């Protein structure tokens, strides 16, 4: 890992966090995307443009995959690829002014190098460097151990538990219960903090899981699709990020087709 690059990313994300906290003092422009439950604000676009501009100024040969479309359209994973979610939990940002995060990840030839997730309103910044470890607010972080599915809460989206397409209700019954934060960033951090044993979702985009993938790799935790197949940065898919024994218990519980 290039530590000059790493320190630059930390600075950019901390600047983004400051801008996001300040932005809550003013009214925002909120537009609907696919539906009234899927919104984007001027700050999603502004933060993404800021991060993309910083990367391009320093690393013009790197590729960028960013939710609001400021980066490149990529169809392979060769070279350095950044994945950016400028605000994860935009609905929470608008409705709660809390429980949202900024996520970035850096991959090389399809393999994770580093992931960054900042819980903006709680000033809680996690990153993971593959081959080095996980840090919380710049201090080494040991992820608390969780013994298994029957000893933990799990995180997901309530909609998928209602439809029970993957036998999530079996997982719910074995666990201590389900919580839903409405943000992949906040959910992923909750698993890293040991508050929950797993985060599972029926449909996530690459910018929702890329940073978690890299941090979980750095932490020695598990990640895949719900059927156990690998995640792919070029596709939306189901996703499961979990503590090792919880991952095994869920794999024995969920439907695999
Ligand atoms: C969304 C959040 C939400 C998840 C959605 C994502 P966004 O991200 O992470 O929790 O259920 O699938 O799209 O749009 O707020 O960046
Ligand atoms: Ca969005
Ligand atoms: Ca987003
Ligand atoms: Ca997102």
Image (spheres, rainbow, N blue to C red):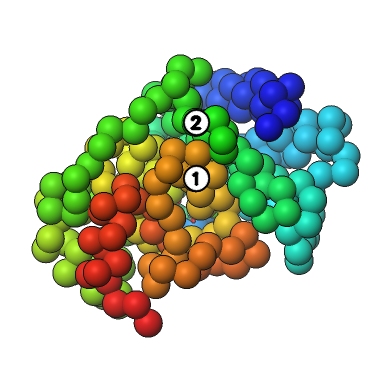
Q: Within 10 angstroms of label 2, few (less than 14), some, or many (20 or more) residues?
A: some
Disc 2 or 1, which lies upstream in sequence? Answer: 2
**Image check: 41 left or right of 184?**
right
Vertical arrangement, residue 8 with respect to residue 41, above or below = above
Percent position (x, y) of residue 246? 26, 53
The front one of 98 and 206 is 206
Residue identified by numbered label 1: 217
Write down the residue under mark 2.
Answer: 133
Which of the image's four quarters has the N terminus?
A: top right
Secondary element at image label 2: strand
Residue at mark 2 to residue at mark 1: CA–CA distance:
9 Å
Identify the mark at residue 257; answer none if there is no mark. Answer: none
- Does residue 177 appear in the picture of this structure? no
Residue at 54%, 44% (x, y): give it. 214
Q: Secondary structure at mark 1?
A: helix
Image x and y of residue 93, in percent: 45, 39
Quadrant in the picture for the C terminus: bottom left
Q: Are marks 2 and 1 in contact (CB under 8 Å)?
A: no
Question: How far across and down, in percent of the image, does residue 247 sit?
Answer: 31, 57
| Depth check, front residue: 49 or 193 | 193
Image coordinates of residue 111 in percent, x first then y, are: 64, 51
Nearer to the camera, 17 or 46: 17
Apparent side of residue 220 relative to residue 79 in the rendered image (left or right):
left
The reply to whether residue 52 is visible in this rendering is yes
């Amino acid at each position: 890992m290039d530590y000059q690059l790493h320190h630059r990313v930390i600075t950019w994300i901390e600047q983004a966090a400051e801008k996001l906290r300040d932005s809550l003092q003013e009214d925002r422009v909120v537009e609907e995307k696919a539906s009234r439950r899927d919104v984007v604000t001027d700050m999603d676009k502004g933060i993404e443009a800021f991060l993309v501009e910083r990367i391009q100024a320093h690393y013009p040969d790197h590729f960028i995959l960013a939710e609001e479309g400021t980066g490149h359209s990529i169809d392979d994973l060769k070279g350095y690829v950044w994945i950016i979610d400028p605000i994860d939990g935009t609905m929470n940002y608008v409705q709660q002014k809390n429980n949202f995060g900024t996520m970035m990840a850096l991959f090389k030839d399809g393999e994770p190098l580093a992931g960054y997730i900042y819980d903006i309103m709680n000033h809680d910044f996690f990153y993971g460097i593959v081959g080095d470890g996980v840090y919380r607010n710049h201090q080494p972080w040991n992820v608390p151990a969780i013994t298994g599915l029957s000893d933990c809460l799990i995180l997901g989206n309530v909609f998928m538990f209602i439809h029970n397409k993957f036998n999530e209700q079996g997982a719910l019954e074995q666990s201590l219960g389900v919580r839903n934060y409405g943000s992949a960033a906040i959910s992923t951090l909750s698993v890293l903090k040991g508050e929950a044993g797993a985060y599972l979702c029926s449909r996530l985009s690459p910018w929702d899981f890329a940073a978690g993938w890299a941090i979980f790799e750095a932490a020695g935790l598990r990640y895949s699709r719900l059927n156990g197949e690998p995640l792919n940065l070029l596709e939306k898919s189901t996703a499961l990020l979990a503590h090792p024994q919880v991952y095994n218990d869920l794999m024995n519980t969920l439907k695999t087709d």
